Image: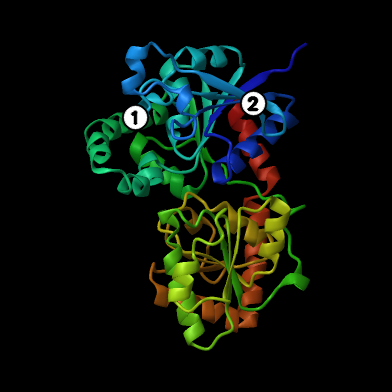
């Protein structure tokens, strides 16, 4: 008897939070004896031959697709689209999507925003979606960098259609939506005018992310994520560090997550922080764990986060978290319990960093609280229970 197959609609497998979520779902499906199959829109910017933009329509060219092995040697399909300039075309269920859907028994979406589930919702088939953030939050900073003609096109056509598609996914009668955080669940519920079906936080692997007290360096703080993304507000963190340095504290900052480790050289020189900041590229789990285990404090300067998976991994290493009030982290950054929430301005962030790093008793209590929270709320066992219950439903 052949194994059941589950189609996972997601984004192109690269580094970042959504691929980490996708890999997590793949592992859970494998544990259930289900073969995961992956499909994603292949971006026009990186795979121009697979899509048919407006100027190429008269040529008679049709959207193409590519196949490659992904997520541990599983079947993966990158699909092009008609008119990729119009974002709402990326996941419309053309023939290639319908053929993939028909070849699988289960249908899931793992995504930054709900739109990856569009093929399932439009075809009216049962699906389970795991969503990190609302569509608007996921792209608001990206739109600011559009050219003026593209912004006009977005405002007049793309955005209205994408909003309608998001509501269709969230309101799909045969769809079940799991949010990545309580913040995401509330935000999606306000769009759908119905509660979401549950919350499944990204589980943390305790075999990799665990305390290592011998690695801890007092006054070493850090952040992991794509800090070139404007949502991460990395300048806020640098300004806070500069204030802590000016107070005479021996603070060091470690950053990870950008392949170009030199991109901050200019700002660091201008702020007098050379020698205080160490930058790593995107790291694998074991290498990231070693970095996190050495931190006194993990700091999130973002203005929007669906969760911030790296912060949970830091907490699993016994590292307290200081964060702005930016969404997902408000689930687990508990004042006096696991860390501290601060206003999105450098003076408040610097004060929280200095207060926790200078008070070793406070830091120890917050460390114990962070570790306990992750063990209770973000364990692999908790994620499996939630996933299986909703998959069966």
* Res 51 seen here: yes
Cα–Cα span, label 2 and label 1: 25 Å
120 to the left or right of 222: left
Label 2 or label 1, whichever comes before in sequence order: 2
Find residue 201 and name its label.
none
Where disc 2 sits, the SS reads: strand
Residue identifier under label 2: 68
* Res 174 seen here: no
Find residue 85 and name its label.
1
At 29% across and 32% down in the image, what residue appears?
A: 158
At 42% across and 57% down in the image, what residue appears?
A: 326
Q: Residue furthest bottom?
A: 248
Can you give x and y, in whole percent of width and height, for residue 355 in the image? 53, 81
Can you give x and y, in whole percent of width and height, for residue 377 in the image? 62, 52
Quadrant of the rendering where the C terminus is positioned: top right
Can you give x and y, in whole percent of width and height, for residue 371 in the image? 67, 62
């Amino acid at each position: 008897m052949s194994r059941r197959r589950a189609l996972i609609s997601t984004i192109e497998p690269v580094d970042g939070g959504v691929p980490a979520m996708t890999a997590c779902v793949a592992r859970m499906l494998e544990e259930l004896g289900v073969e995961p199959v992956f499909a994603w829109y292949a971006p026009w910017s990186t795979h121009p031959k697979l899509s048919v933009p407006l100027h190429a329509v008269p040529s008679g060219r049709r959207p193409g697709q590519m196949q490659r092995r992904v997520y541990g040697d599983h079947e993966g399909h990158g699909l092009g689209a008609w008119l990729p300039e119009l974002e709402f075309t990326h996941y419309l269920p053309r023939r290639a999507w319908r053929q993939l859907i028909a070849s699988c028994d289960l249908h899931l979406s793992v995504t930054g925003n709900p739109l990856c589930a569009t093929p399932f919702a439009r075809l009216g088939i049962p699906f389970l979606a795991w969503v990190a953030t609302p569509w608007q939050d996921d792209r608001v900073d990206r739109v600011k960098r559009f050219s003026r003609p593209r912004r006009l096109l977005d405002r007049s056509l793309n955005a209205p259609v994408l909003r309608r598609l998001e509501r269709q996914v969230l309101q799909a009668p045969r769809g079940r939506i799991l949010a990545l955080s309580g913040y995401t669940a509330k935000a999606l519920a306000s769009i759908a005018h119905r509660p979401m079906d549950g919350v499944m936080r990204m589980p943390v692997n305790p075999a990799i992310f665990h305390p290592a007290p011998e690695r801890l360096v007092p006054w070493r703080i850090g952040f992991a994520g794509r800090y070139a993304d404007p949502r991460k507000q990395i300048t806020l963190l640098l300004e806070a560090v500069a204030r802590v340095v000016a107070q005479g504290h021996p603070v060091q900052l470690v950053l990870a997550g950008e392949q170009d480790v030199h991109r901050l050289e200019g700002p660091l020189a201008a702020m007098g922080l050379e020698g205080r900041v160490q930058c790593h590229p995107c790291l694998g789990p074991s290498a990231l764990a070693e970095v996190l285990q050495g931190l006194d404090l993990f700091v999130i300067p973002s203005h929007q986060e669906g969760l911030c998976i790296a912060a949970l991994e830091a907490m699993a290493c016994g590292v307290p978290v200081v964060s702005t009030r930016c969404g997902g982290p408000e689930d687990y950054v508990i004042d006096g319990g696991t860390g501290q929430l601060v206003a999105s301005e450098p003076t408040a962030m610097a004060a929280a960093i200095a207060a926790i790093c200078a008070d070793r008793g406070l830091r120890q209590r917050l460390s114990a609280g962070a570790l306990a929270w992750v063990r209770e709320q973000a364990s692999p066992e908790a994620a499996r229970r939630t996933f299986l219950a909703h998959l069966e439903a």
